[in-house]
Image (cartoon, grey):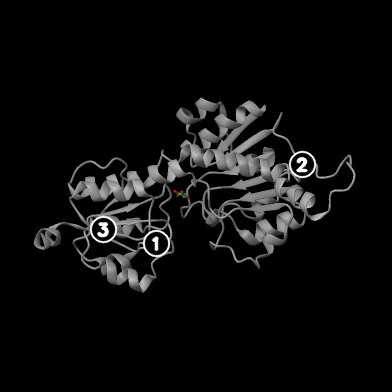
Amino acid sequence: MQRVMQELPRVYVTRRVPPAGMKILKQSGMCHIEQWDSDDPVPRQELFKRVSGIDGLFCVLTEKIDAELLDAAGPKLKVVSTMSVGYDHLSLDELRKRGIRVGYTPDVLTNAVAELTISLLLATSRRIVEAADEAKNGGWGTWRTMWLCGYELSHSTVGILGLGRIGVAIAERLKPFGVRKFIYTDAGPRPELANKVEAEYVSLDILAKESDFLIVCCALTAETQEICNSSMFSKMKNTAIFINTSRGGVVNQDDLYKALSSGQIAGAGLDVTVPEPLPTSHPLFKLKNCTILPHIASATYSTRNAMSALAANNVLAALKDEAMPKELKL
Ligand code: DGY
């Protein structure tokens, strides 16, 4: 029995992951599973040791998968499967060079991320956190005509930076709120997606100028790194609300801080920051018009289990040299 176990491909799971994925790996009987049995990330030096000689890696977005890590893993590594739709933590060039296949988890989290994005948008524009704090902390005096006023979606223009599956899902859910117009920008027009929500393709400049709500949904790449910066914020309306549920790296946070504290824009809701966690001493936390969440957009029980299951199925398919359910084309 021991001998058979040793001959099975070794899969290293870098974290405790939702049960659906572990069940699939275990029930497959086709791999020997090793796991960092913690909710916290495996220390990098420890990871280097653990990955030596593995065939498959099941990771999450906190693990940087770069040349150093892949060298530590060695030539047997066939597949890296990340339990995330984002893959900015993976060095794609290095993976491509080594012929390592990559799995990721698009689609299964679209609804959860869209729901959270809308929650964050409403929380920010209607000042929900600030209002709840006032109610709890004695700031609630008499009913006042202009107290805690915010901005509404009815008749608004919503701008989407990066119109993919998630951007469309957000627009579909926002439409019933009475949004007047959807506009978007991306590397180029995406008519097949835009037609679903009647969104108009515009330049980044127009997106900044016309959006009452500007929602960032793009992937973090070399092209989108800090694309939301002082140049963009300076063109936005001073009544505009900025929402980011993609990656913190798309935003220049110093510029965002200046835009928020100077009243250049009205408010921001962030589910992602640089770094994560954002230190509690960070100036953005001092602003009443900035709502910050700890990267929870996909955090529903069903979605996290679906992501875990998909990541597991991606690993198993690659180990069998079969088509992966969701393979990233490198
Ligand atoms: C992802 O999957 O990339 C999200 O940021 C976390 O679910």
Q: Categorize mark 1 by other alpha carbons within 10 Å: few (<14), some (14-19), many (20+).
A: some
Residue pointed to by mark 2: 150
Q: Quadrant of residue 278?
A: bottom right
Visible in this render: residue 60?
yes
Residue 114 image point, x, y percent: 53, 38
Residue 136 image point, x, y percent: 77, 52
Q: Cβ(mark 1) to ligand 1 < 8 Å?
A: no
Residue 150 image point, x, y percent: 77, 41
How much space separates mark 3 and mark 1, taking CA atoms?
A: 19 Å
Which residue: 60% across, 53% down? 293
Dots 2, 1 in contact, CB < 8 A: no
How much space separates mark 2 and mark 1, taking CA atoms?
A: 39 Å
Residue pointed to by mark 3: 97
How much space separates mark 3 and mark 2, taking CA atoms?
A: 51 Å
Query: SS of the residue at dot 3?
Result: helix
Of pointers 3 and 1, the one earlier in the residue sequence = 1
Which residue: 65% across, 46% down? 242
Residue pointed to by mark 1: 63
Which residue: 56% across, 55% down? 294
Residue type pointed to by label 1: Glu
Viewer-nearest of discs 3 and 2: 2
